[in-house]
Image (spheres, rainbow, N blue to C red):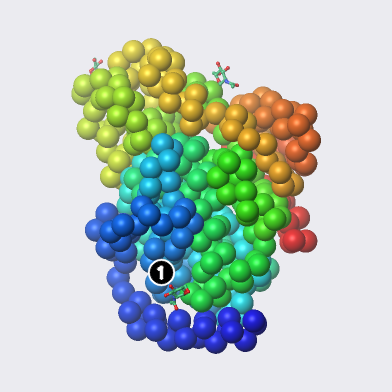
Amino acid sequence: MFLQIVLSLFGGLQLLQPVAAHAVPLPPSVDPFYQPPPGFESRKPGEILRSRAIDIPSSVTGASRGHQLLYRSIDSHRNSDAVVTTIFAPSNEPCTEVLSLQTAYNSPATDCAPSYTLRSGTASLPEQDVIPMALKYGWCVSIPDFEGPRGAYTNGLQSGYATLDSIRALSRSGNVTGISSSAKFALAGGSGGAIGSEWALELMHEHAPEIEERLVGALLTALVPNVTSTFLSVDGTISSSLIPLSLLGLSKQSSSFADWLAGATTPNQTSSFFAATTSCADKFGTSFSFRSSKSFLRRTNAVLESVPQSTIEKVGLMGRHGRPSIPILVYKGTQDRVSPVVDTDRLVTEYRSCGVQIEYRKATNAGHSLAGSYGFVVGLPCRVDV
Ligand SMILES: *[C@@H]1O[C@H](CO)[C@@H](O)[C@H](O)[C@H]1NC(C)=O
Ligand SMILES: *[C@@H]1O[C@H](CO)[C@@H](O)[C@H](O)[C@H]1NC(C)=O
Ligand SMILES: *[C@@H]1O[C@H](CO)[C@@H](O)[C@H](O)[C@H]1NC(C)=O
């Protein structure tokens, strides 16, 4: 078995390497790799539709191989879609431990997905240092575009399904990636990345029960359990750009939400607001920081209106879709201004009361970004004992 994997691995590499050598990456919106082949709807969620070898970006130190898979998944309405994940391996040995790292790319723009920004060198992901750290432990790392092909930022259903299907795809990718079919997986994510990770835990029983035995644990930092609460909390603060980014992300899979949003934005702000669909979160953020939502939404507390609330009820509240069944480490700052600590307290209490095994650590006086990042320093080594 071991020899078979190694042989097919080398076979695969020989086949794929000349194609990928020094290729300048194309953005997802124009790269044919991202387009699912005709008839892909008849494939099962988690099936691999396409694969390729990629050059290792200079930011990813310690990787010896890089690959991407296009796999079949579903959106929040259970319609077929196709999602890309990017995999780095620390050596040419078969991989038996994989970290599924959901990153906080926080963008409603197709071309800001990590599968592209990592390769083009334009990524400014808070978790970028986690990739070399995990490779050093000998793990493979998978970074899925869990917001789906159109950047459904803060849509929990899309994020969870895409994350679960990436693990299914990785489990059958051995002849391409060297990941063993019996490999164990850990999930990790902070803030926007914790949306993919947490919703995957909630939706596992409904969508992908067979992967439970291969998931060993999850690290969730700077959780954002309630999108409405975040809207109210970040208004006028350094993080206020999350309001347009999230509203645009939520509008991607709901035409009634999109119609509502078109009418809710202040007319002379529409073009700068909608710029978030083409400019990545780090660049867009500077233009909407410290803004009151009153300056770009026509009505006070527009996010509390019935149209946005009915979408948020379905895709923006954690803890309503299923009980996680693997051990979880939750790391949260008590001074989080993006998502108040009480929301995470409530979620953890609910889960614990149903028997979920959670270690809940709080960083006293730490805010959202600090606790979000520091949680990885604290949490990753704890998960080595897979
Ligand atoms: C890997 O195996 C699958 C299923 O057996 C096959 O369809 C695919 O072409 C193989 N890929 C490579 C790169 O060998
Ligand atoms: C989410 O936050 C809003 C605003 O703070 C609050 O009214 C609502 O009750 C919260 N929902 C849940 C399920 O905690
Ligand atoms: C946009 O319009 C509002 C009134 O609706 C006004 O208060 C504001 O100054 C305008 N901003 C710009 C940049 O023109």
Residue 127 in view here? no
* Quadrant, the C terminus: bottom right
Instruction: Report whether 88 appears left or right of 352.
Output: left
* Quadrant, the N terminus: bottom right
Q: Which residue is mark 1?
A: 51
Query: Is residue 5 or residue 26 the one in the foreground?
Result: 5
| Mark 1 close to ligand 1, CB under 8 Å | yes
Residue 78's spot in the image, x, y percent?
43, 40
Q: Secondary structure at mark 1?
A: strand
Q: Residue at x 28, y 59 (%)?
A: 38
Instruction: Report whether 126 appears left or right of 306.
Output: right
In the rendered view, tell whether residue 311 sits above or below residue 287.
Answer: above
Q: Which quadrant of the structure image shows residue 363?
A: top right
Q: Residues within 10 Å of mark 1 (few under 14, many from 20)?
A: some
Q: Residue at x 21, y 23 (%)?
A: 268
Query: Is residue 335 or residue 329 the one in the foreground?
Result: 329
Instruction: Report whether 32 appears left or right of 237.
Output: left
Q: Residue at x 39, y 26 (%)?
A: 291
Residue 157 in view here? yes
In the rendered view, tell whether residue 234 sits above or below residue 7.
Answer: above
The amino acid marked with disc number 1 is: Ser
Ligand number 1: quarter of image: bottom left
